[in-house]
Image (cartoon, grey):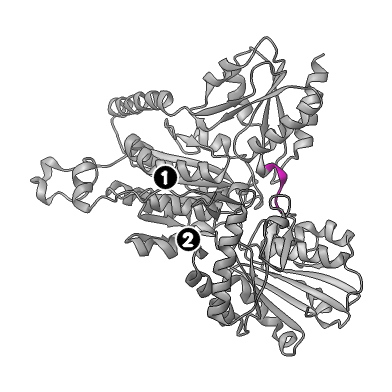
Amino acid sequence: MITDKVLMKGNEAFAEAAIRGGARLYFGYPITPQSEVPEYMSRELPKVGGAFVQAESELGAINMAYGAGAAGGTVFISSSSPGIALMQEGMSFLCSAEVPLLALNVSRGGPGIGGIQPGQADYYQVTRGGGNGDYRIPVFAPSNIQEAVDLLYEGTELAQKWQNPIMILADGMIAQMMEPVRLPEYKKVLTPDEIAAHRDWACTGFDDRGGAENRRVVKSLRMQPEKLEEHVEYLFEKYARAEKELCRYETENLEGAGVVFVAFGTTARITREAIEILAAQGIKAGLIRPISLWPFPNKAFDEIDYKTTKAVISAELSMGQMITDVQIALNGRLPAFLAHRTGGMVPTSPEVAARAKAVLEGLK
Amino acid sequence: MKRIIVIAGHYGSGKTELSVSLAMQLAKEQGRPWRQLSLVDLDVANPYFRSREKRDMLEKAGITVHADTFGGMQAAELPALTASLRAPLENPDCQVIIDLGGNDAGARVLRQFRKYFEGDEHALWAVVNFRRYETRDVLDARAHVEAIERELEMPVTGLVNNTHLLRETTEEIILEGHEKAKALALAMDKPLLFTCYPAGVIDAGDLKGISPLMPLQLYMRPAYLDK
């Protein structure tokens, strides 16, 4: 059967999905392993009436995104781990000021400038917030290019709906590999008048709204503690709704499983191969694949078969960060263990399978 | 076949898979006119999936691998080349496969080795995949091939059809690519050298009417990506 699928490298597909999703403003600075995204944006955005700006640094990029988003623009930014770290102050400002933004972190090994091979050690940074103050950022972690395309495409709308940054966390492997994808249709892009009307909080100029009393203000400074507390509580009512509405996950093979893996992104794919290896050895293993990392899919853990499952293994490209959320979700029902590599190293499926086997042996 | 084979093409057209598969295949061939075989990885554009990652496998097969300056640092993203890669180019008893980076930008690095391409010892192949988003039609593919020629100031001597969708490749997709590749070859007045197919996904017997065929083993793709 001839399909209309095309073969794309992750980064190219991410950029194209953001454009098709309506993003018309991009600010960024090159960093491996995501530099194909700004490269693609610099070439393609002008063709659809958008604007690409290479900022002087990631700090510049996030603040350009803050300004453009506050003015009602549909903004997309991307970077990789150390670059995203530089943007954290801006993320906090955007959350407080309720400015929409679609952000992509193609994560690599750290800490520090680290290396350029894939990593998932930005889990705490994205789920806990690397910036100051009380805020939350919904984070989605695709495990293949098509899923990333779909999330980025939807992400432009989610950012506007929640008036908050939305983060897509894709590790370097998903960004650098190629896969067949089906690209979605181009979304209709709002005209400046439509933006002024529909994004009724955005600073689109006040000439036609009758002066200062109708002015729109986008800000994060609130000097009176009563007002600031009220604002933060308002934000957290919004986050409470987001926790319910944005929770996404998949489960596989949980019924009758002796051991359950929890893994996202590339690691979920390695884990699937490990599950096959274990099955060949007579060990039934299941998988919980969080798609949203915040909100973390706690309810997926209610689907574990507690009659048969002896242990839960958090498989990560880090020294163990998601495992904290796994333990919270398990709430003492089962012990949680770690299967991991870090620093840009990717475990093989036999390594992951062997770890699961060793954990089960140790519990006997 | 020429002694020096330069493999160029659009980003993600399959240059590296072709280079590695070709090297592994040549290493097994008896009675080759050159006693030695080298793979030169000149990809300074891509940080992942470079042929140097398969150094161990290639060297076991008797192929010397020349890549970045820092032999052990396959993950380095420095556009630094090892001086050793001139050795196979200068050795008349060594066949060389040169795996370039993608597009005209990735091909640029070859210019510093121009003196080796002044004679008649080399071939410059351009790989095309008509299922890549940016080379879906003949005109786009042609623009990419011409950009590489302009950058290198060397004519592409032959085209390679590598139209595929990885494990979702079907015979129809390869046939469709083959038709476009023939049109491209005609338009550019260049030979279509052969058509690749992913071994283990497609059976050569199902590609009747296409020849010559070249199986690609997908050495670079980790198996877990297809789970």
The question of residue B221 being in magenta is answered with: yes
Quadrant of the rendered image containing residue A283: top right
Q: Amino acid at mark 1?
A: Tyr
Q: Secondary structure at mark 1?
A: helix
Which mark is first along the chain, 1 or 2? Answer: 2
Q: Which residue is mark 1?
A: A153
**Residue B124 in the image: x percent, y percent?**
68, 78
By secondary structure, the bulk of the magenta-drawn segment is best described as loop
Q: Residue furthest top?
A: A307
Residue B171 visible in the picture? yes
Look at 50% across and 63% down and name the residue there.
B136
Q: Nearer the viewer, residue B218 or B52?
A: B218
Look at 42% across and 45% down and name the residue there.
A153
Up the image or down, B144 lies above or below A244; here it is: below
**Residue B190 in the image: x percent, y percent?**
61, 80
**Residue A268 in the image: x percent, y percent?**
64, 35
Q: Which residue is mark 2?
A: A40
Horizontal relation, residue A227 to residue A113: left or right? left
Q: Amino acid at mark 2?
A: Tyr
Up the image or down, B215 lies above or below A167; here it is: below
Q: Which mark is residue A210?
A: none
**Residue B189 in the image: x percent, y percent?**
58, 82
